[in-house]
Amino acid sequence: MSKKKVASAAMIAGAISAAVAMGAAVQPAHAAKIKCYGVSEAGKNDCAAGPGTTCAGTSKVDYQGNAWTYVEADSCEDIVIKVDGQDDRMGSSEPLERDLPS
Amino acid sequence: MGHFAEALLNPEQQAPQGVGREGRPAPRRFAVYRNNVVVGLLEAMKQAYPSLAAIMGEANFSKVARHFISAHPPQSAMMQTYGRPFAEFLESYKPLAKSPFLADIARAERAWLAAYHAVDWPVLAPEELASADNPSELSFQPHPAACLLRSNYPLFDLFNARETWPCPGIDLDEAQAVLITRPELDCMITRLDGADTAFLAALFDRQTLETAITSAMEADDGFEPAGAINLAFATGAFCSLEHPLSQTSNPPA
């Protein structure tokens, strides 16, 4: 019924240029992400790598000081989490002594 | 040792000979040990299959996982590989025959873990394709972390149950395909439409770019090759180009 569609070389070349122009490529590896301590919600810290690893969403309390989440570099210290009736929590590139599980 | 290993996973069996002090058997101590072993494996299963555990409910999941554990002692000391054949087990598990989507969830969760532990390998850069001489004749080397899964069920929604459960409105009649990749540190899961699925499946199958685009156009008139190529870059699904006549450096298997 309908004739078989075939992708032409010109169309493919055009599609590639358009795709490159969209530019949503993965950023180069280790693109400026750092571990940011003290900002993860309980059980949501990064490196959820499954059983047999010790880092898998294991934080016990919100904003646990020694649990971390990957964030863009430069943004970690800007993170301020407001909790009603408590001191603000700020991110840190070093592990913190606060909010450790008892 | 054979008897010891069997007795370890089967509470019906007696404590093995020789377990005890000064020749006296110690069945209760052995039972404690047996329980610890099974609970440890069960915990590994829950961590490997959080969406399944959410959807099935903790109690049901544990029950099924215990059946699995007694039939599948660990084959490796690496816990992240434990439970690998769970999807096949679920498929053949009679009481769950009416929920065939569970096996697909298990496959996706296993692919997600495999992606985490896959070798670190750079992804294909758009410039590489843009500067290739005859791009339509090229095929693509899949990235070691990448996995394409097609399902008759809403696999993307079901997989995300780990975050969203209990969530309203999963339509079990909807078929969804997903692409699991790890472009750098974090795994990602991407829902694919029919044409993108046909396109990527052909590329994963080492077809040329031209063939892949043609099969996607056959699957859907509205296929947009630029968007699909961009998607392949953005997800990090591939790591290098394969020229028909030359060898490229491949990641270790």
Image (spheres, rainbow, N blue to C red):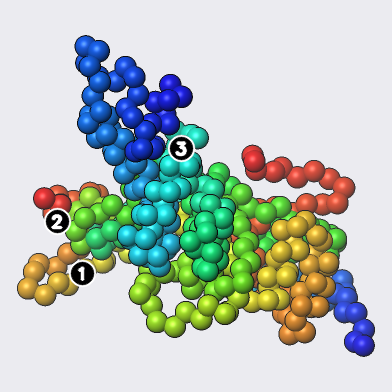
Say whether residue B188 is visible. no
From where the camera sits, is residue B200 visible? yes
Q: Is A99 in front, or is A56?
A: A56
Residue shown at 52%/56% (left/top)?
A: B93
Please tell me in which quadrant of the rendered image residue A79 appears.
bottom left
C-alpha distance separating marks 2 and 3? 39 Å
The span from disc 3 to disc 1 (Cα, nearest Å) is 45 Å
- Cα–Cα gap, marks 1 and 2: 13 Å
Q: Nearer the viewer, mark 3 or mark 1?
A: 3
Return the residue found at the far top: B22
Residue that carries the numbered disc 3 in the rendered image: B73
Q: Chain of mark 3?
A: B
Q: Which percent across, then down, holds residue A54?
A: 33, 44
Question: What amino acid does circle 3 point to?
Answer: Pro
Residue at the spot of label 1: A81
Whole-percent x and y of residue B31? 27, 34
Of tags 1 and 2, the one toward the viewer is 2
Label 1: few (<14), some (14–19) or many (≥20) C-alpha neighbours in 10 Å = some
SS at mark 3? loop
Residue of label 2? A99
Residue flagged by tag 1: what amino acid is it? Ile
Chain letter for the residue marked with disc 2 in the picture: A
Residue A23 lies, with reference to residue A72, above or below; the image says: below
> Mark 3 packing: few (<14 Cα in 10 Å), some, or many (20+)?
some
- Decide if residue B17 is on the left or right side of residue B160: left
Position of residue A6 relative to residue B134, above or below, is below
